[in-house]
Image: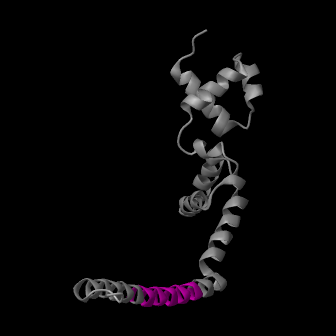
Amino acid sequence: MQFTEGFKKAMIEKLLIHGGKGITELSKEIGVSTQTLYNWRDKYSNGPQVLKAKSPRKWNIKDKYSAVLESSNLSEQEFGRWLRETGIHSEHIELWKKEIEEMVSSPKDKEEIRELKKKNKELEKELARKDKALAEMAALITLKKKAEVIWGGEDQ
């Protein structure tokens, strides 16, 4: 039995956004195998549903930050719809906001960065001093070899 593209998209929308019905229930309701529904979902789901495949616990900090930014300017209804589309809960957004705030405002991190910058500056000074000493030694060795060529070695 052939289904139209519109029907397939409607069923996937029903599955992902509006429903709460599982693939098994929808499969029985419309008489299509679950594998066919999985195939349709993979083919027609795009946009926010891509994130739905990944558990919110496995999101990296960049995705979390993007989600917090994206959700911050939405009205209550839009926010609810956005949560359903992305497959996360409002608690995730609140938790991620706190994580980001801690990362940005942590005095420990600021102090650590300050110490690392200080150590980096000291190491750069030491490296510059050693580079100068190495260049001086190379010049001395070159002069010694030239002097030996001109006046002869210590043996002569």
Q: Determine the main secondary structure of the stretch shown in magenta.
A: helix
Q: Residue at x 57, y 59 (%)?
A: 71
Task: Name the quadrant of the C terminus.
Answer: bottom left
Quadrant of the image occupied by residue 100 = bottom right
Image position of 97 with respect to 144: above or below:
above
Q: Foreground residue, 37 or 142? A: 142
Q: Foreground residue, 71 or 108? A: 108
Locate residue 56, reporting x and y percent. 69, 53
Q: Foreground residue, 96 or 1? A: 96
Q: Residue at x 53, y 17 (%)?
A: 4
Locate residue 1, reporting x and y percent. 61, 8
Q: Residue at x 41, y 89 (%)?
A: 133
Image position of 84 with respect to 73: above or below:
above
Quadrant of the image occupied by residue 155 = bottom left
* Magenta residues, start to end: 114-132
Q: Foreground residue, 65 or 113? A: 113
